[in-house]
Amino acid sequence: LADQGVDVAAFKDDMTALLWAAESGAVGAVKTLVERGADVNGARGVDNCTPLMRAVMHNHLEVVEVLLGVAACDPNVAKTDDGMSALLIAATKGGLTMIKLLLQRGADPEQRNFTDNGQDAMTVAEDCGNFEAANLLREYVVDRDKVMAVVQIDKVATFGETAVFEVHDASPGRVSSR
């Protein structure tokens, strides 16, 4: 392409060729564009997604593997208006293979979107009813000893027992009695 004078960074309908290729699952085109220097973290279009996000959104696992194989590809880039990253998008879909791949390649399971309560991928998966995905994400929480805590409340409950709660993380709504 570049040998033929084609600009790999050119836009058509507010999208680069790499964005189009990633969205459509065109693995060969993605490889060629990446080899020719296309910006793997470049975001445009209506949703401001990166090529990686578009590939995740359309469940193109092989394209995701190609993109993550590029050293410059950052799975934690959050460019959408609501702060979605590739992992947060994958959490909405619930695809375990996709989520595992992103996590293995450095996606941050604790990265939060820009919604009012700043949800992490585990919370997003739970809210979308993807409970297997939420359980998988729970396994990847960094430094679980810092996140997990047992809090004993000094106040005696009305039944004469001390109330004990297990705090799963600092997010609201993550407290369950045990």
Image (cartoon, rainbow, N blue to C red):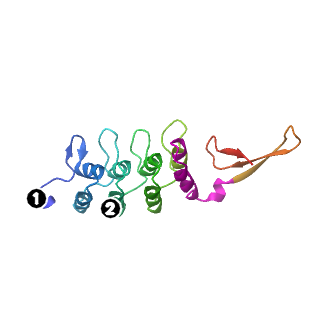
Residue at x 50%, y 49% (from the top left corner)? 111
Q: Which residue is mark 1?
A: 4
Up-down relation of residue 92 to residue 3 (above or below): above
Say what amino acid the circle numbered 2 marks.
Val
Q: Is residue 118 above or below residue 39?
A: above
Closer-to-camera residue (128/80): 128
Name which residue type carries label 1.
Gln
Which quarter of the rendering shows the N terminus?
bottom left
Local packing at callout 1 (Cα closer than 10 Å; few below 14, some 14-19, many 20+) is few
Residue at image coords 15%, 59%: 2
- Residue 166: image location, x then y, percent: 71, 49
Q: CA distance from mark 2 to mark 1?
A: 23 Å
Residue 163 part of the magenta segment: no
Which of the numbered marks, if any, corresponds to residue 66? Answer: 2
Residue at the image point whose x is 46% and y is 45% from the top:
92
Question: Does the magenta portion include 147?
Answer: yes
**Furthest residue in direction left, as rendered:** 4
> Which tag is nearer the camera, tag 2 or tag 1?
2
Query: Where's residue 29, x and y in %?
Result: 22, 57
